[in-house]
């Protein structure tokens, strides 16, 4: 049996909605389905205003522009994240300050956030790894205490909650991903959630996403013409992608339920290997979290054992992957003055984590095969 790491899941209405958009002649980024998706997310998650974007990377870049980052500013974030989180800050001339993660959750450690706050700190970017919420009460407390802004990198956390509040809605701004590897997909796509009215963020966001113009207000009939107002770019996704995405969002909770079954199956059948030397950790749901079940991981004693396990699984037709390579010790991180050894927990997790195949349409036979082969691999390690 061949088990890929990820597989596209179709709900059934994707082509119908794409055909509808084509029949209406709506291909550009301001079409009907873009509006439908925004309205859906606003209502479902209780967001002040949502703007869809071409990627979550662009949502993060917009967020960095919106809070007015300047050279010399600092933004605290985990090193255990995708480069887009740090690039959004670098592109504004500011500096990412990397904080440690907690081994129990793989999310940023609020204690280290506070240690890293300086007079140059402007914002915190918590990253909700695996769709599990960070300790957001403490993050928000720190932001209030030190007059900082919060941008949630909720790329992996669409339809997940912390303390019964949806992720992406706690901070001033939230950023979502609909990349083909996420729970809800359209190939490439994202969204930015404007939760705060601080300094007219919504109006600024509309201008930035429309090439720096007030065209959105013109389309609403609030202007007789539109003009170039500020720096911006083209962050609007095609209406065809949003038609595809809406078909996914219609099945938002069904997809989550299907993924919960997979997560629980892995957890139930692999939990017993904890404490036996080979498996030192597995995915767990932290207190207060209602995740979206984005992924499932195992933690091995070290990189050598992890890599051997991955190779053995590959021989059995199972694709398992690891991530992230810590940003602080990457070539760009070293250029910024960081080095290996700065964040030992992050480095230890990165070298020992292995993510198992996990996709919405995964069958019972596929899950059984993966667990069966993991059991065999553990005996070989």
Image (cartoon, grey):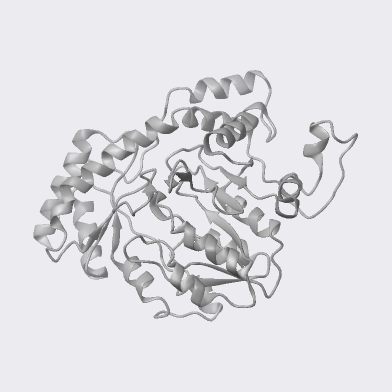
> Which residue occupies the foreground of this view, 324 or 312?
324
* Residue 310 image offset from top left, x and y in percent: 24, 58
Q: Residue furthest left?
A: 379
Q: Residue at x 24, y 64 (%)?
A: 306
* Residue 231 image offset from top left, x and y in percent: 78, 55
What quarter of the picture does the N terminus occupy? top left
* Residue 165 image offset from top left, x and y in percent: 48, 45
What quarter of the picture does the C terminus occupy? bottom left
Q: Is residue 269 visible?
A: yes
> Which residue occupies the foreground of this view, 283 or 185?
283
Q: Is residue 360 above or below residue 327?
A: above
> Which residue occupies the foreground of this view, 287 or 318?
287
Q: Quadrant of residue 215?
A: top right
* Residue 239 image offset from top left, x and y in percent: 63, 31
Q: Is residue 137 above or below residue 51?
A: below
Residue 310 placement, left or right of 180: left
Residue 27 placement, left or right of 252: right
Q: Residue at x 41, y 29 (%)?
A: 10
Q: Residue at x 55, y 47 (%)?
A: 169
């Amino acid at each position: 049996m061949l088990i890929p790491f990820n597989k596209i899941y179709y709900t059934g209405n994707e082509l119908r909605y794409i055909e509808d958009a084509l029949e209406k002649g709506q291909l550009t980024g301001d079409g009907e389905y873009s509006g439908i998706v925004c309205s859906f997310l606003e209502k479902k998650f209780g967001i002040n205003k949502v703007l869809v974007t071409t990627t979550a990377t662009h949502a993060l870049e917009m967020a960095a522009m919106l809070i007015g980052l300047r050279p010399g500013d600092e933004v605290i974030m985990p090193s255990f994240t995708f480069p887009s989180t740090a690039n959004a800050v670098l592109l504004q001339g500011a500096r990412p300050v990397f904080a440690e993660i907690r081994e129990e959750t793989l999310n940023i450690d609020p204690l280290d956030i506070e240690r890293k706050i300086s007079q140059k700190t402007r914002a915190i970017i918590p990253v909700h790894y695996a769709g599990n919420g960070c300790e957001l009460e403490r993050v928000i407390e720190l932001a209030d205490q030190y007059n900082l802004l919060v941008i949630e990198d909720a790329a992996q956390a669409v339809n997940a909650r912390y303390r019964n509040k949806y992720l992406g809605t706690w901070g001033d701004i939230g950023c979502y991903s609909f990349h083909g590897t996420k729970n809800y997909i359209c190939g490439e796509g994202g969204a930015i959630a404007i939760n705060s009215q601080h300094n007219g963020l919504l109006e600024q966001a509309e201008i930035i996403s429309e090439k720096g113009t007030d065209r959105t207000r013109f389309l609403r009939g609030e202007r007789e013409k539109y003009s170039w107002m500020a720096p911006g770019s083209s962050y609007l996704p095609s209406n065809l992608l949003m038609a595809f995405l809406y078909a996914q969002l219609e099945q938002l909770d069904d997809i989550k339920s299907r993924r919960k079954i997979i997560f629980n199956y892995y957890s139930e059948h692999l939990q017993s290997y904890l404490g036996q030397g080979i498996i030192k950790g597995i995915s767990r749901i932290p207190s207060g979290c209602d995740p979206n079940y984005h992924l499932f991981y195992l933690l091995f004693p070290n990189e050598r054992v992890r890599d051997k396990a991955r190779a053995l699984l590959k021989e059995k037709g199972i694709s398992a992957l690891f991530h992230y390579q810590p940003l602080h010790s990457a070539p760009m991180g070293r250029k910024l003055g960081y080095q290996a050894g700065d964040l030992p927990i992050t480095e230890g997790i990165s070298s020992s984590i292995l993510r198992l195949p996990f996709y919405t349409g995964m069958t019972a036979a596929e899950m059984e095969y993966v667990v069966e082969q993991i059991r065999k691999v553990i005996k070989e390690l």
